[in-house]
Image (spheres, coloured by chain):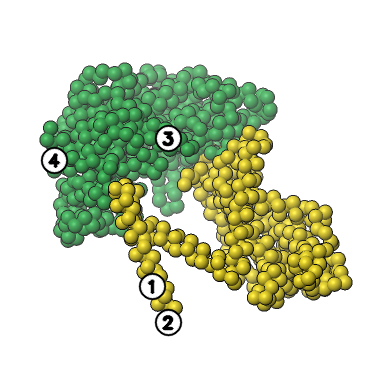
Chain colours: A yellow, B green
Amino acid sequence: MSMILWILLMVLALGLAGWAFRLAGQNITGNSPYFRDMPYGVAFGYALAAGALLGGLWLWFQPGAVFFRWAFQGVVIFAIVAWLFRLLGRAVGTAGTRKLFREMPLTASFGILIILIYAVLAIFAGAIAPHGQEEVFARVNILPGGNPETGGDPAFPLGTDQIGRDLLSRLIYGAQNTVGIAFVTTCLAFLLGGSLGFLAATLQGWLDQVLSRAVDVLMAIPSLIFALLLMTIASAWAGSEKWLLTVYMILIIAVIDSTRVFRLARAVGLNIVVMDYIEAAKLRGEGLPYLIFKEILPNAYAPLLAEFGLRFCFVFLTIASLSFLGVGIQPPLADWGTMVRDLSQFINFAAFSPLTAALPLLAAGAIALLTVAVNFVVDWMLHRTSGLKD
Amino acid sequence: MSDLLLKIRGLKIEGRSDETWLPIINGVDLDLHKGEVLGLIGESGAGKSTIGLAGMGFTRDGVRISDGSVEFDGIDLVNASAETKRKLLGTRIAYVAQSAAASFNPAHKLIDQHTEAPVQHGVMSRSESAADAVELYRRLRLPNPEEIGFRYPHQVSGGQLQRAMTAMAMSCRPDLIIFDEPTTALDVTTQIEVLAAIRDIVEQFDTAAIYITHDLAVVAQMADRIKVLLKGDEVEEAETREMLSHPKEDYTKSLWAVREFKRPQKRVVASGAVPVVSVRKVTAAYGPVKVLRNVSFDIHEGRTVAVVGESGSGKSTAARCITGLLPPLVGSIMVDGVEMPADYRKRSKDQLRQVQMIYQMADTALNPRKTIGEIIGRPVQFYMGLRGRDRRRRVEQLLDEIELPADQYFDRLPSELSGGQKQRIGIARALAAEPRFIICDEVTSALDQLVAEGILKLLARLQDELKLSYMFITHDLATVRSIADEVVVMKEGQVIEQGPKDEMFRPPHHAYTDLLLSSVPEMDPDWLTNLLAERGVDNIGDAAVDKMG
C-alpha cells in the first residue's frame, strides 16, 4: 500500500516539476514561441527525463548496482566505438559509401558494426576461437576472470563449463551455429512466404482462398507449441542422425514463420497489383514471373526488408528457445540458447561473484545485442527507402 | 483602410529539402477587404495553396514562414500563439479543401462533423448549430436539407459533399474562407451548381474569400480581383474584368492563349473504309450491374475519336472492353475488320501490341522503381526483340520523339520527373510497341493547362507522323474541341449522340450534349450569372441531368 502511495507521490511531484519548468521557461525567455506553445505533455516528458537521469545517478553510486554500472559503461563504450566507426566510414571508401556514412545516424552505424563483428565471428569462428567447441578439458567449472587466485585460469578467460569445455570458444562458435541457422531459416521463410504471397495477390481467386485459409489454420496454432510438437515428431524421424534434426528444425521454423511473411507479402502485393503499371504490363502480355519479380517485388522491398529484420530476430529467438528447451540445436554443437540453460544456475551467485553470474547473461546478451543491432539497421534502411523525414 | 481584413506583406516561405531551406514564396503582398473575393491562379508549384494556408497563419510540415507579416484584422498571425490561432481558426477563418471526400471523416455523419466546430468554440449549442446546418444546407440548395445531414459522407455525391463542406466552413459565420480548388475534382455539370452555391452564400453573408484554382474560367466567375502567381512570385494583380480583357504580362497572356489551340477537323472518312477499331453492340457489366448498353462506334486510321461524358458514364469501361480487361457480355471488338478474342489473356502478342494505352495518372502508370530506360525498353525488347545496343538506340529514338533529351533522362527514375514529363514517358512506352491504335484515358486532366497543351500538340504531331488512331477519353470539352475529329457522347452506359466534331459543336444538339456544352465555364465573367438567369437556379447540375431521365 505504501508503495502505491510513494509512486503516486512521485508522479505528482514530476507533474508539478513539469508545470514549473514550463512556467520558468516562459518567464526566463520572455515568452518565446517554443515555451509558449509547449503542450503540457512535452513539459511532463522533460520532467520525467530529468527524474530518470537523477534516479540513474543515484543508482550508479549504490554499492550493489554492479550490473547497472556494467550496462551503462557498455552503452557508453559502444556509443564511442560506433561513433569512431562512423568517422572511419566517412574517411575511407568510395564516394558513395562515404556519403552513406555522412547521413547515417549513430544507431545505424552501431547496428552495422555489431552485425559486421558477428559476421566475422561466425565466418572465422574456427580461426578466432582459442579451442574447439567440442574439446573437453580435464578441469571443469573454472570460474571466469582468468585470475588463479579467484579460481580462474588464464588459458580459459571465461572459464569452463560442467564437463570442461572452454566457454569463450563455445560463445564464439555459438555465433556460427545460432546466427547461421537463423539466417538460413529466415531466408527460406521469405522465399516460401514471399513468393506464395505475391502469387496469391496476383492471381487471386481460388488459389488465394486456398493459400490464405491454409495460412490461417497454421497461424491459429501458437507457434512455439506447434514448433515443439513438430520437433518431437521430427526427432523420432531423425533417430540418431543429429544433423538431420537440425535440417528438420530449419524447415519447421521456416514454414511456421513463412505464414507471417505470406500475410504481409499478400497485403503489400494487393496494393501494388491495382496500379496502372501492373495493368500495362498485363496488357503487354507479360508472364507471371516477370510480373512478380520485376514489377511487384521492387515496390515491396521496403516493407519486406523491415519484416526481414523483425522476422530474423523472431526466428533467432525461436531457435534459442527451442535449444533452451532441449529440442533445438543439439549438443555437442555450441549454441547460445543451450548455453543460457546450462549456465542458468550461476545467476544465483550474483550477490557474491558478479562475474560468475554474468556468464548466462553473456549468452543472453549476445542474443539481445544482435536483435537490437538488426532492428537499428532495418529502421534506418526503411527510413532511407521510404524517403520519410523526421 | 479600415475594412482591410487580411494584410500580407513581403511574405517569404521556405521548404526544407535535404537539410537546406529552399524558397517557395519569394515575397508576396496581398490585401483582402471585407466581403471581397480574391482569386489566386497559377500552375501547380506556383505556391497558391501555400499562400492560402499562410493566410490562416498555418504552414505544412517542413515549411516555415521565414520573413514578412500576415495580419488578420489587426492580429499578427506569424507570431501569434497556438492558443490565439486556435480561437481564430474555425470561428473567423475557415478552409475548404479540394477533395471533400478525403476531408470528411467517413465514420461520422455530416451533421455531427458540422456541429463540432461551433460547439468546440462555444459559438452555439449543439441543437442551435444543427438547426443552422439545415438552414445552410437549404441555402446551398442541397436536396432534402432536413435529412441530408444524417447521412454519412459516402452516401452523398461528390458535388453535394463539396457543398456540405462549404456549409461546414460557414458554420461559425467566419470573416474569411479559403477555398482550395473546391471544384477541380468535379464534373462540369456538378461544378456549376457548386460554383453557384459558393458564390451565393459568400454574397449573402458578406464573407471575404480567397479562391485558389488553376482554371481561369472558374476564377472569372467567382473573384472580384485576380492575382496571378508563378513559381512563388506575383506576376500581376487586377480587377477581374480588367485582367481578362487586358492582361499585361506575357505569362498571363500565355495562360489566356492556351485555350485557343485547335486542330482543323480531318475530312470525314469514306463510307467503305475498314475502321482500325470497331466496337460492335457491346454490353458489359461489373457483376450484376450493367455499365455499358449496346455501345457501338468506329475509329478510323489517323483519326481521333473523343469519348465524352461525366464520371460513371461508361467511358473508361468502353476502353477496358477494347483492351480485353473486361470481356463484354454481348458484342465484339474488331481490329482491322478481324474480331479480337474478348479476354486479353487469349490475345496473341501481336494483337496486344496493336492496342496500347496511356493512363490518366502518370504517377501510378509508371513503375516507380524502374528507370525511364527500363520502362520504355521493356516493350521494345518484348515486342521487337531488340537487345543491348539496339534496344538502347531505339529507346533514345523514342525519347527523341517525345521531345526529351535522351542522355539526361535515360537513367532517371519517374519520381525525378515532372507531371508532364511522366505523361510523355507514358506516351513513349505506348509508342514503343509501334501500335496502330492508342487509348488516351484522361491523359491531360491531371496536368496544368500549359503542360496539357504541350501533350496535346505532341499527340497531334505523332498522329500525323505515324498515322495513329486515338480514342480520347475525357470530360473536358475544351480538350475535345482542340484535338478530336469525331465525338461520341456517353451517358449512363449508352451512346447518346455521335458524329464529326464540327457538327457536334453546332446546334441542334441532343438535350444532354447541350447541357454538357453549356456547362463548360467560359472566360466571360458574366457567364455564370447569365446561365443562371437563363436556366434558373434549380435547373443546373445534377437537377438538370435528373430531369432528362
Residue, disc 4: B206
**Residue A9: which disc?**
1
Query: So how many labels did they put on this image?
Result: 4
Q: In which quarter of the image is residue B315?
A: top left
**Dot in front, 2 or 4:** 2
* Left or right for A86, reference A276: right
State the separation of the CA atoms marked 1 and 4.
Answer: 56 Å
x and y percentages locating residue B475 in the rendered image: 35, 34
Residue, disc 3: B21
**Labels 3 and 1 within one chain:** no
**Labels 1 and 2 within one chain:** yes
- Assign the N terminus of chain B to one quadrant of the image: top left
- Assign the C terminus of chain B to one quadrant of the image: top left
Q: What residue type is labelled 1?
A: Leu
State the separation of the CA atoms marked 3 and 4.
Answer: 39 Å
Q: Quadrant of residue B537?
A: top left
Q: Helix or strand or loop: what does disc 3 sit on?
A: strand
**Depth check: A118 or A354 in front?**
A354
State the separation of the CA atoms marked 3 and 1.
Answer: 46 Å
- Are the two marked residues, 1 and 2, in contact with CB atoms closer than 8 angstroms? no
Residue, disc 2: A1
> In the figure, B434 relative to B124: above or below?
above
Q: What residue type is labelled 2?
A: Met
x and y percentages locating residue A345 in the rendered image: 70, 76
Q: Helix or strand or loop: what does disc 4 sit on?
A: loop
The residue positioned 20% from the left and 46% from the top of the image is B92
**Dot in front, 1 or 4:** 1
Task: Kindly tell me whether residue B260 is visible in this rendering.
Answer: no
Task: Kindly tell me whether residue A4 is visible in this rendering.
Answer: yes
The residue positioned 68% from the left and 28% from the top of the image is B387
